[in-house]
Structures are given as structure tokens and as C-alpha cells.
Amino acid sequence: MISITMIFSQARRVLIASVSTLLLSTVIMTNVNAADTATTYSNSCAACHDSGALNAIKKGDSAKWQQLIKQKSMPTLINSVKSGMVQMPAGGLCDACSDDDYRKLIEYMSK
Ligand code: HEC
């Protein structure tokens, strides 16, 4: 016969298992996101923003990036990338990037 205590201990075990899975996946997802930004940067933006090719502002030139973010605001910069500029192709060579991805990439370059 199944006792009430057994059901409770079973339920507690299931609960603990789900909470640990949830915590674990949160940790993994956070890491994947950070890695994704670096990878996307390397695959798309780095071609110009690493070397400053075509006069693109270099990654890590914090002073210039911070000034630009203050001057134009983040949503404007995201739109610049999406629609392209004089030399920068529309999308900055990342077709799959969302607005949020572009924001993360710009923040990544500004550090
Ligand atoms: C083919 C070269 C090239 C690639 C690839 C590229 N950029 Fe650019 N980017 C430029 C250049 C050059 C400028 C300066 C404006 C111009 O002349 O087009 C610029 C300017 C910018 C600006 C400033 C926009 C403004 O309004 O002043 C942002 C933000 C930016 N790039 C983000 C990105 C991001 C994010 C990526 C990757 C997803 C990327 N760029 C990929 C060349 C590039």
C-alpha cells in the first residue's frame, strides 16, 4: 500500500529535480548567450570593426563608442546597422541578428 509519506517524499524528489534542472539550464543559457555575442561578432562585425577597415570604429575604442551611443542613442545605432550606412552593408553581415543581438554586439564592441 502507498502511504501519504511516500507520496510526499516522491513529490519532493520530483520538485528538487525540476528546480535543479531549471537552475542548471539558466546557467548554461546565460553562458551560451555571452559566447554567441562573441561568435557573432567574429563572424560578422569583426571583418571591419576589428581593424577599423573602411574607417569603422574599432572594437574596444570605448571613448568613441560611448560618445556615439550618447550622441545618437542605442535605438538609432541599431537602425543604422539594420539599414546599412555609407560603407557598412545592411545588417552588418548578420542576417539572423535581432535588434537585441545588435544591441549586445554594440555593447560588446564598446567595451
Ligand atoms: C563591411 C564592413 C562592416 C561590417 C561587416 C560591419 N560594419 Fe559597422 N560600420 C562599418 C563602417 C565603415 C562604419 C562607419 C559608417 C560608414 O561609413 O558606413 C560602421 C558603423 C557602425 C556603427 C555606427 C552607426 C552610426 O549610426 O554611426 C555601428 C553601431 C556598427 N557599425 C555596428 C556594426 C555591427 C553590430 C556589425 C555586425 C553585426 C557591423 N557593424 C558590421 C563597417 C562595417
Image (spheres, grey):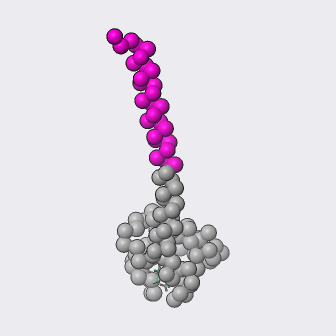
Q: Quadrant of residue 69?
A: bottom right
Whether residue 74 appears in this view of the structure is no
The magenta span reads 1-27
The majority secondary structure of the magenta stretch comes to helix
Question: Residue 12, how many percent across, how many down?
Answer: 45, 25
* In magenta segment, residue 22: yes
Outermost front residue? 1
Outermost left residue? 1
**Residue, x 49% and y 47% (percent of image)?**
26
Position of 108 with respect to 16 (left or right) is: right
Decide: is 105 above or below 61. Answer: above
> What count of labels does the image hold?
0
Residue closer to the observer: 9 or 43: 9
Question: Residue 25, how many percent across, how many down?
Answer: 46, 46
**Residue, x 41% and y 82% (percent of image)?**
89
Q: Quadrant of the N terminus?
A: top left
Whether residue 43 appears in this view of the structure is yes
Decide: is 5 above or below 68. Answer: above
Residue closer to the observer: 94 or 10: 10
**Residue, x 46% and y 41% (percent of image)?**
22
Question: Residue 19, how many percent across, how many down?
Answer: 47, 36
Q: Quadrant of the C terminus?
A: bottom right
